[in-house]
Image: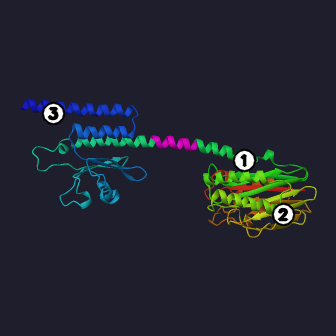
């Protein structure tokens, strides 16, 4: 009997070592989570005669990873944070167990990097049977096995998440590159004796909902636009690219601004179903007549500064934003005669919402000090960018920032 018992124990030890070796080999072969759990379930139920096992695992939230031998809905009444999270060691559930734990006998916590990442619940101890229950007999081996399997599945999840994040990063980089192609760079902005333009664009994320554009309409006329989609990120960027395509298709020398705004409003409503809107300042400057024609559709009022008379004023809104209403009730086109050398500064709200050292928004008054001078508008913009630390990771920036400046001669 003694020799037979020693032989059985030796064979059992060999079996467990082989099982751990096989698991290690399987993990090194990069199996799926389903394959690992299937191997784990077969080992417990077929080799060790463990009848019932359930696993809760933490991913983004606690979820049931394996339910073998229990009723399908047995896990639904368990709240991990309340019922299990206080268990730091193997725990035998007492006879006066709560009703939602009555199917289970043992709780095995799995802790990785000092954090609970899973709980294994076992529930088939037969107190009426003779001999030692297989659960009790193999408890520490089950714990070791569970730790290996759970950590392996967590590594699989993290690896998949890393792959997913890398793919998202590549997609965002491509989207940012494509979006940058929609926005004119400095080399495409006019620099003539009559009109000079400068711009700055800085999305809060990789892509953004700000947009500016500049279009030469004919020999004397130049069209431009500054726009901002409500919201940020990819969805705002998609809406803005759609807006850019529509604007480019519609904005011609002969179109009336009122008709342009009406059509843009219809198309944006079709695209966003009323869930997003766009504020916009759109203008057209004639270098022969020195007339600036514009509509401000709910956008931040651009600042215009007469460098001769040293007079500063704002071009305020004269209609609501694009997509705010099914039909814009009132649209008024304005025309301003530029009689003296002047500067115009248009911007999105990310610029005026930057917080100062007292956590107060800078506001439009802070912008005035940068433009009320004889310096070129390009220098004015660069001074703003440097002063606010926009390219240096200023933590008080919460939105996309775009600036478009003009000098009228």
Task: Identify the mark nearer the N-term, 3 or 2.
Answer: 3
Q: Which labelled disc corresponds to residue 305? A: 2
Tell me how far mark 3 sits from mark 2, CA to CA. Answer: 93 Å
Q: Nearer the viewer, residue 346 or 168?
A: 168
Regarding mark 2 in the picture, which secondary structure is present there?
A: strand
Regarding mark 1 in the picture, which secondary structure is present there?
A: helix
Q: Nearer the viewer, residue 314 or 271?
A: 271
Camera-near label (1 vs 3) is: 1
Residue picked out by circle 3:
9
Mark 2 Cα-neighbour bin, 10 Å: few <14, some 14–19, many ≥20: many
Task: Identify the mark nearer the N-term, 2 or 1.
Answer: 1
Quadrant assignment, res 273 = bottom right
Residue occupying image coordinates x 31% and y 37%: 39
Q: Locate residue 146 relative to residue 311 in the image: left or right.
A: left
Quadrant assignment, res 403 = bottom right
Residue range highlighted in magenta: 159-169
Tell me how far mark 1 sits from mark 3, CA to CA. Answer: 73 Å
Residue picked out by circle 1:
182
């Amino acid at each position: 009997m003694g020799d037979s018992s020693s032989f059985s124990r030796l064979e059992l030890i060999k079996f467990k070592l082989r099982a751990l070796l096989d698991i290690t080999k399987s993990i090194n072969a990069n199996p799926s989570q389903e394959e690992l759990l299937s191997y784990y379930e077969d080992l417990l139920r077929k080799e060790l005669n463990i009848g019932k096992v359930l696993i809760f695992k933490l991913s983004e939230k606690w979820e049931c990873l394996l339910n073998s031998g229990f009723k399908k809905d047995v896990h639904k009444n368990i709240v991990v944070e309340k019922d299990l999270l206080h268990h730091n060691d193997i725990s035998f559930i007492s006879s006066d167990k709560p009703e939602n734990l009555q199917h289970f006998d043992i709780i095995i916590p799995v802790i990785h990097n000092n954090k609970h990442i899973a709980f294994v619940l076992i529930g088939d101890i037969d107190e009426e049977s003779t001999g030692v229950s297989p659960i009790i007999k193999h408890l520490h081996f089950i714990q070791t096995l569970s730790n290996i399997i759970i950590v392996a599945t967590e590594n699989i999840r993290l690896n998949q998440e890393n792959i997913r994040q890398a793919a998202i990063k590549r997609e965002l980089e491509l989207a940012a590159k494509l979006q940058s192609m929609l926005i004119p760079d400095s080399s495409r902005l006019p620099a003539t004796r009559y009109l000079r333009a400068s711009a700055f664009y800085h999305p809060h994320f990789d892509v953004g909902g700000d947009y500016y554009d500049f279009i030469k309409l004919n020999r004397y006329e130049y069209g431009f636009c500054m726009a901002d989609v409500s919201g940020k990120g990819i969805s705002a960027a998609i809406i803005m690219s759609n807006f850019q395509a529509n604007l480019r298709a519609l904005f011609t020398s002969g179109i009336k601004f009122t008709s342009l705004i009406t059509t843009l409003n219809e198309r944006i409503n079709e695209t966003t179903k009323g869930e997003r809107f766009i504020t916009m300042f759109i203008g057209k400057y004639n270098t022969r007549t020195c007339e600036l024609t514009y509509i401000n559709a709910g956008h931040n009022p651009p600042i215009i500064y007469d460098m001769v008379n040293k007079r500063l004023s704002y071009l305020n809104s004269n209609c609501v934003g694009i997509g705010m209403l099914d039909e814009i009730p009132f649209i008024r086109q304005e025309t301003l005669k530029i009689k003296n050398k002047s500067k115009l500064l248009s911007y999105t709200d990310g610029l005026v919402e930057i917080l100062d050292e007292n956590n107060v928004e800078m506001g439009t008054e802070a912008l005035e000090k940068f433009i009320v001078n004889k310096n070129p508008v390009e220098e004015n913009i660069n001074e703003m960018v440097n002063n606010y630390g926009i390219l240096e990771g200023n933590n008080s920036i919460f939105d996309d920032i775009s600036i478009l400046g003009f000098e009228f001669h």
